[in-house]
Amino acid sequence: MSETHRYCTFTLDDQLYGVAIGCVHEVLRHQPVTRVRSGSKAIQGLINLRGRVVPVLDLRTFFGMAPRPAGAEPSNVVVQAGGRMVSLWVDEISEVVTGNLDDYETDDTSHDRPGHEGVRGIYKLSDRLLQVLSVPEILEGATE
């Protein structure tokens, strides 16, 4: 029997992405953001998550994608790793997907390709591909 992993999935520009379910703190509808100066273009500001100040990272900007269409509000996937927490702005929340390790291919070259930083591998699902993100790498890349 093959090993399986579970992912919280979401879309960005009609592409399916996912993060390990163990890194997900919670999923939220769009939240008001307090704009702040940041060294990263992808950091959009801060949200107040029940008294905890959490930075907001726009994954479209992080991956160098076109801006979100006017009037389209992003959803938030709040993730944590290494004691750090960030809210990822995504286009739309999908579902929890269980991936079979037999259908997984690592992507060790992603750090060499602009726009693919943080993509660790790809699952071949029955109807599409799921790009798996590394939360620690996304958090590290967001602060550079």
Image (cartoon, rainbow, N blue to C red):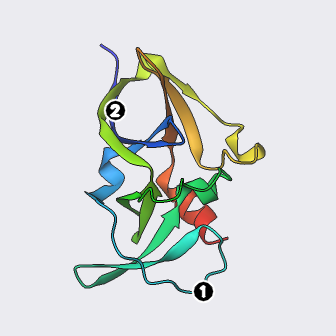
**On the image, numbered disc 2 is attached to which residue?**
5
* Vertical comparison of 5 with 63: above or below: above
Image quarter of residue 138: bottom right
Residue at the spot x=68%, y=53% of the render? Answer: 64
Residue at the spot x=29%, y=13% of the render? Answer: 1
* Vertical comparison of 42 with 128: above or below: below
* Vertical comparison of 40 with 36: above or below: above
Figure quadrant of the C terminus? bottom right
> Horizontal placement of 23 versus 89: left or right?
left
Answer whether residue 82 is visible to the viewer in this image: no
Residue 21, horizontal then vertical, whole percent: 31, 46
How packed mark 1 is, by other alpha carbons closer than 10 Å (few <14, some 14-19, many 20 or more), is few
Outermost residue, front side: 71
Q: Disc 1 versus disc 2: distance between alpha carbons?
A: 37 Å
**On the image, numbered disc 1 is attached to which residue?**
37
How many discs mark residues in the rendered view? 2
